[in-house]
Amino acid sequence: MASAGRGFNAARAHPAPLDGLEALIAAEPALEGTLDTIVELARREVPPLSMHAVGRAEATTISRADAATWVARMVVGSVQQPEGHPRLDCAPLLGSPYPAERAKLRSMLAYFERIAAEGLPSGTLRVERVVVPARSADDWRSDRSPLTSLDVFAEGAIEDAPQCRQVDFANRFLGGGVLSGGNVQEEIRFAVAPEHLAMMIVSPMMRDDEAIVMTGCESFATTRGYGGTLAYAGHYRDPCPRLADGTPDLELVAIDAVDYRRGNPNLQYLEPAVLRELGKARAGFARDDHATGVAAPGVAAPRNRAIATGNWGCGAFHGDPPHKAVLQWLAASAEGRAIRYYSFGDPRVGDLAGFARAARERSFTVGALFDRVVATAGCDGAALYRLLLA
């Protein structure tokens, strides 16, 4: 690389291979100028960020300008690495020979290209650690809340759901493998909306009763494919509404499902597993009475938004889509939130919309449906809906 590339390499805390970055620049030479922007951002003085404590509800606000510096520092590898925390630098992507990982890096570079062209973004990001005490089975059985509406969309994507709290199918460590070999839902979202990366710095591992709510992070790139077929598809200008100060009015909530890759997936139907997933989803869907949305000046908008979700934990983690859909609906109903369910055309989801309509017509409560879910333990797939309505 020429002068910009040499300056970038000199700024890196731990020089390592740059094969992936060099391949991108060889294909798009104009990208080399973006490296100067990254170096300049990484050298800015910004307030320090403090790690949140596991088990304690707390929130951190970060200006979007300062977040750009933290993301740049992650690219050059100058963020201090906390003990026991997943890596906070992009070295694996910078040196990767794999196209899917280069696609993530290219998506991140789109963010810096925008900053180079238009300047630092305005507005504020917020990352909140939510802690919601677990409920017992008796607590769930006694819940007389009505079931909220549930709409199913075979097409479209969670990230396109307007004015919703969008669900990040998360790793218990926020961001999962975004800075290394992960190329699925969470990692893709963080790559195309890199401001989320700054939130990884303050977010230790989630417990079963915790979720992480992130607000204000827009997307700067678009992709196609998934997993090993992931490819960069170009720049993206997010059409989301904005607050008066320029903050994108977006909410993303990270909830980690149980991973059954090394266990028995049939355990997911038993009461302890049901309670765990309900508790996790309820933490993510908890009512939010303090955040503000797009509204008239000085007037806070209602924030008990619908939940935009889908097949949570049903890919690599081997969750059963109908079962997980019903659990998410229970948790959302307990918190008074509607569901917008994006099935991605997965036939395993079955007639979720028909089931939801029938359950509401029968005036099922949260407690009544919970009781039926536990009673049908071991029943998977489309048969679950039939048995729950029997």
Image (spheres, rainbow, N blue to C red):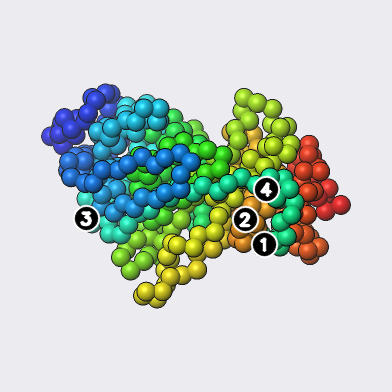
Task: For label 1, count other residues whose C-alpha is less than 10 Å away and answer few (under 14), some (14-19) or many (20+).
Answer: many
Q: Residues within 10 Å of mark 4 (few under 14, many from 20)?
A: many
Tell me, for residue 390, which label it has, or none: none
The residue carrying mark 3 is 119
Separation of residues labelled 4 and 3 (CA atoms) = 44 Å
Q: Which comes before the other along the chain, label 4 or label 3? A: 3
Specify whether 101 is left or right of 158. left
For marks 1 and 3 on the same chain, the one whose residue lies earlier in the sequence: 3
Is 367 placed left or right of 187 in the picture? Answer: right
The answer to whether mark 3 and mark 2 are in CB contact below 8 A is no
Gap between marks 1 and 2, in whole Å?
8 Å
Mark 4 residue element = helix
Q: Earlier in the sequence, mark 2 or mark 4?
A: 4
**Residue identified by numbered label 4:** 327
Whether residues under marks 1 and 2 lie with C-beta atoms below 8 angstroms apart, the answer is yes
Q: CA distance from mark 2 to mark 4?
A: 9 Å
Q: Position of residue 316 (x, y in %)?
A: 59, 33
Q: Which residue is mark 2?
A: 332
Q: Marks 4 and 1: in contact by CB < 8 Å?
A: no
> Could you tell me the amino acid type at mark 2?
Ala
Seen in the image, is 56 located left or right of residue 243? Answer: right
Q: Where 135 falls versus 258 (above or below)?
A: below
Image quarter for residue 250? bottom left
Q: Secondary structure at mark 1?
A: loop
